Amino acid sequence: MEWSYLKTYYLDSQTVNPSSGYLRCPSCGFLTRNPEMGDPAVACPECSDHGKPRFHWPVLEAYTLFSMIREMMNRGEKRADTEVERVTSELANICRSSVQTETVESLLRQIHNMSCAEAEKDGKLAGLINSHLEVPSECFDDVLCGLIDTEAVTDEHKVVVVLTMSLTEVLLNDFLANVLVANRVNLPVARKCVRACETYTSKNALFKDIVGESIQRTIKGAVEASKSSKSFLDDLQCIRNRRNAFIHGDPDAISREHARRAFSVAVESFAVFADLFNRHCRLERETVPDVPRAS
Ligand SMILES: [Zn+2]
């Protein structure tokens, strides 16, 4: 999803929450954002049942995680913007020429993405800096120090990536438990089964046994059906890799761009998983899917 759209609707506007408003029919499991379904007297369009309160979806943990992700993204973006503006004016002073914040942001992003080996290669870093800024040769070391000391990727950006993976795992675990419920396993046992599958590989094997295709393939279908951006799966894979590299000891594995891609995944994951629920978690008999959240 475009960053400008995400920023305007989901970051700056604190009132818009992509996890809000989903209601689930307790009889057939149909999930919708139609607010009319909030009235128990309105018949479910899928099974015509009425009279019982509808459940809220997603689970409370997902809602809470999204609020944390948004808060961290907000703080991270503000701190990074302030830092980019600070270094932009510092570089303008050093070079005694006008410098654009967009240029500095692009330069910082490319330096962050450059491996140590690349940066140490003769002339590579200098070439990159000189292609963006007009640096008098006697000032080059000062410019280099100014750029290297800039923290355009904040700790909050790294937390956004880690929390977004937690969010998708919470949604995935709840989805798998409800797939089992739809196959006549009671919810406490279903949750135990999912908890017992500690790795993504074992969860995928469980899902494949029941549904007949991989989680990845199923999510791909849901992405297309829910009109989410085509980059959802690539973004999800990318941030999963970055999160894993980060928690296994690479503190620079996550960039500001990765945090933005993670935020996009966090926003879109609700529509994607709602579609997954409607495809694979429909109930043939009355089953209590979850404890409704107090609203
Ligand atoms: Zn229904």
Image: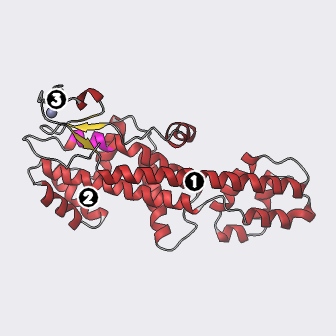
Where disc 2 sits, the SS reads helix
| Extent of the magenta region | 273-279
Tell us which disc is closer to us: 1 or 3: 1
* Residue beneath the point at 36% across and 42% down: 19
Where disc 1 sits, the SS reads helix
Whether ligand 1 has any atom under 8 Å from the Cβ at mark 3 is answered as yes
Q: What's under tag 2, amino acid-wise?
A: Asn
Magenta part, dominant SS: helix
Name above or below for residue 19 compared with residue 118.
above
Image quarter in which the C terminus is found: top left
Residue picked out by circle 3: 46
**Which label's residue is closer to the chain start, 1 or 3?**
3
Residue 216 placement (x, y as % from top left)? 32, 51
Whether ligand 1 has any atom under 8 Å from the Cβ at mark 2 is answered as no
Q: What's under tag 3, amino acid-wise?
A: Glu
Residue 276 on the magenta span: yes
